[in-house]
Amino acid sequence: GQSLEQPSEVTAVEGAIVQINCTYQTSGFYGLSWYQQHDGGAPTFLSYNALDGLEETGRFSSFLSRSDSYGYLLLQELQMKDSASYFCAVSLNYGGATNKLIFGTGTLLAVQP
Amino acid sequence: DGGITQSPKYLFRKEGQNVTLSCEQNLNHDAMYWYRQDPGQGLRLIYYSQIVNDFQKGDIAEGYSVSREKKESFPLTVTSAQKNPTAFYLCASSAARTGVEKLFFGSGTQLSVL
């Protein structure tokens, strides 16, 4: 079966750096993406990694190691508005015939002043 | 503005009743998805469609049905066979049919049982 694991909660202070890890066990792996969801809202796309390495987008960076089935989201210069749930998601592709995105259970990030 | 529109925002279902959640997109995306989210949990895939007139079951399709008669529309019906329908339902779309990189989500429908 498919499984993704990420911590359920993380707490950090404003201005700090926080890393949210994600490990996965899947077949047909195509890429790893990250989404942010504020309470009661819709998830919004943050980043996507198909190849090993680090992708940087402003204060957010995402890393992937395909050989370790592992990735992380790095949030720098934390702001209060970053308090939200963060989901890793695995893109699955079975030779082009089937294509879908499976989500982890989410990490609730609480940023404290 | 391009985007995904879900309606209604809140929906109440009586016992034994079927209800339909609407999802419309004007992004010209090929692929569309339905996810269910329970409180404090992740998103679970119900159904997805990569092209008009074709769709596949996700991980929790039992008690749900969909149709994809138009590229812009992907309605979800929660049937009376779904015994625990209370959840937040999210519709999404993506431009790519393969190797989904980025999903665009609607604002969701909260379904509750009376």
Image (cartoon, rainbow, N blue to C red):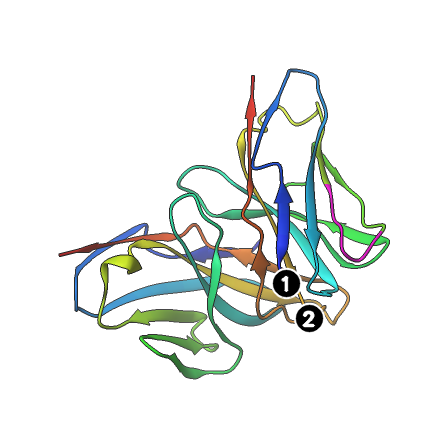
Q: Give the residue displayed 16% in from the left and 63% down from the top.
A: A14
Q: Position of residue B44 (x, y in %)?
A: 56, 46
Task: Work out whether disc 2 and disc 1 sit on a shared chain.
Answer: yes
Q: Position of residue B57 (x, y in %)?
A: 72, 47
Quarter of the image for residue B17 reads top right
Is residue B55 shown in magenta? Answer: no
Q: Chain of mark 1?
A: B
Q: Which residues are magenta?
A: B70-75
Inspect the image, locate mark 2, and give the three-letter code of the amino acid beneath it.
Ala
Q: Nearer the viewer, residue B3 or B76?
A: B3
Give the label on residue A48, or none: none
Residue annotated with mark 1: B2
Residue sitting at the far front: B1
Going by the image, does A68 lie left or right of B89?
A: left
Q: Nearer the viewer, residue A12 or A66?
A: A12
Quarter of the image for residue A39 reads top left
Inspect the image, locate mark 1, and give the three-letter code of the amino acid beneath it.
Gly
Q: Alpha carbon of mark 2 to alpha carbon of mark 1: how far?
A: 17 Å
Secondary element at tag 2: loop
Quarter of the image for residue A6 reads bottom left
Q: Give the residue displayed 73% in from the left and 65% down from the top.
A: B28
Q: Nearer the viewer, residue A30 or B74?
A: B74
Q: Position of residue B85 (x, y in %)?
A: 59, 29
Q: Is residue A107 above or below residue B108?
A: below
Residue annotated with mark 2: B96
Q: Position of residue A32 (x, y in %)?
A: 50, 69
Q: Are marks 2 and 1 in contact (CB under 8 Å)?
A: no
Secondary element at tag 1: loop
Residue sitting at the far left: A113
